[in-house]
Amino acid sequence: MAILERIQASDHEQLLFTHDRDTGLRAIIAVHNTTRGPGLGGIRIREYDSEADAVDDVLRLSQAMSYKNACAGLDFGGAKAVILAPLPADRRAAFLAMGRIVEGLAGRYVATEDMGMTEADIAVLNEVTAFAVGRSRDAGGSGDPSPHTALGVFVGMRATARTAGLGDDMRGLSVAVQGCGKVGLGLIARLIDAGARVIAADTDAAGVAAARDLGADIVATDQILAVEADVLAPCAVGGVLNEATIPTLRCRAVAGGANNQLATEADADRLAARGIVYAPDFVINAGGVINVGDELAPGGYSPERVRDRVLAIEQTLAQILAESRQSRQSTAGIAVIRAQRLLGNG
Ligand code: NAD
């Protein structure tokens, strides 16, 4: 399909291909929807096999940001940028160039951190544009988003467990956590604190050691998805819920922080057919974007407002899960319909 047709088919507003002559920086920015406000989404630095793959990725990710931001009740639309790796050797010059490109969009796109970036890169962007958020707390920003993501996953998991008939609180429940990184460890700490039993796995020894220190039982990474547990929490990579893994799951619910957990849309129906309640990833993992977006709130960043909004994920998910039961559509399908309604399309 030709590119303009692709943009139209996915209902994007804008797709910008850009090259900086001085540094050699090459980037693509997709603005999906600005009905609710500026398109907020990260800049991903990644090596792609082809330009077509980069376009696919940025279009998919920017649409997902519209859905995530809408379901979180934020006054932001969705957008995303990819920088085609390798990043130019002069990192500072590359981010200054990227900042000028973002500034040129005059607020239609608000950039934040994604794979391959750091808070320090955001500070460089801010030297040339105000339309970048996610600086460190020391630099006057909202700081590390992952504790907020972990809190959102924890309260969202409570709503999911309740819907799956597992009771009102996490005490006594078993939770299998795949990935003991920033989000996974934050979640494990909260679960242990709430009296749950945690089984965890990570490909990295440091993650495993940290999870063990928190009180988790450790299993091998190739066992974690099929471990017997009340809830499975994918907190590592995308695509883990697929045609091969879903028949092997031994849990009643899936509620985790990873992005793009479902390999395909059909996997939402596969989970439903097995009676497994799935918390749509872009709803349950919105804590981080809620935190970062608050930097642009009138009056400035407010930790109390962020906390209230993150806690509200429990209620939002409960509504989505209830609607899914009533309509017999998958939870992921209902979440997309809800997002589209909030974007004025339905
Ligand atoms: P992270 O890099 O800190 O942690 C990921 C962990 O997963 C690492 O410890 C890594 O070793 C481990 N891992 C990778 N592959 C694995 C595998 N096959 N099996 C087991 N462990 C594996 O990242 P993070 O910030 O904790 O994010 C985790 C997930 O949540 C990602 O999908 C990310 O996109 C998503 N997410 C994060 C945030 C946030 O605020 N950080 C917000 C929304 C979504």
Image: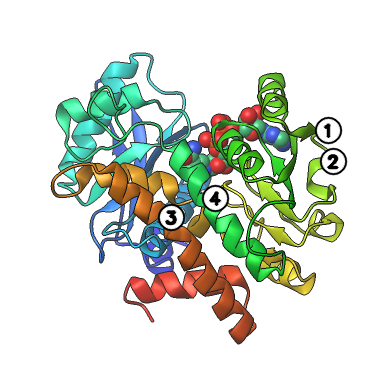
Q: Nearer the viewer, mark 3 or mark 1?
A: 3
Q: Residue at x 60, y 58 (%)?
A: 158
Q: Secondary structure at mark 1?
A: loop
Q: Give the quadrant of ligand 1.
A: top right
Asked whether the residues under the numbered discs 2 and 1 touch, taking CB atoms below 8 Å apart as contact, a structural biologist would say yes
Residue at mark 3: 311
Rendered position, 94 above or below 318: above
Q: Callout 4: 10 Å neighbours few (<14), some, many (20+)?
A: many
Amino acid type for the residue under numbered disc 4: Val
N-term mark: 2 or 4: 4
Q: Nearer the viewer, mark 4 or mark 1?
A: 4
N-term mark: 3 or 1: 1
Q: Residue at x 40, y 66 (%)?
A: 5
Amino acid type for the residue under numbered disc 3: Leu
N-term mark: 3 or 4: 4
Q: CA distance from mark 3 to mark 1?
A: 32 Å
Q: Residue at x 85, y 51 (%)?
A: 228
Residue at mark 1: 220
Looking at the rendered structure, the number of numbered marks drawn on it comes to: 4
Q: Callout 1: 10 Å neighbours few (<14), some, many (20+)?
A: few
Residue at mark 4: 153
Q: CA distance from mark 4 to mark 1?
A: 23 Å
Residue at mark 2: 223
Instruction: Give the x, y percent position of residue 36.
Output: 26, 64
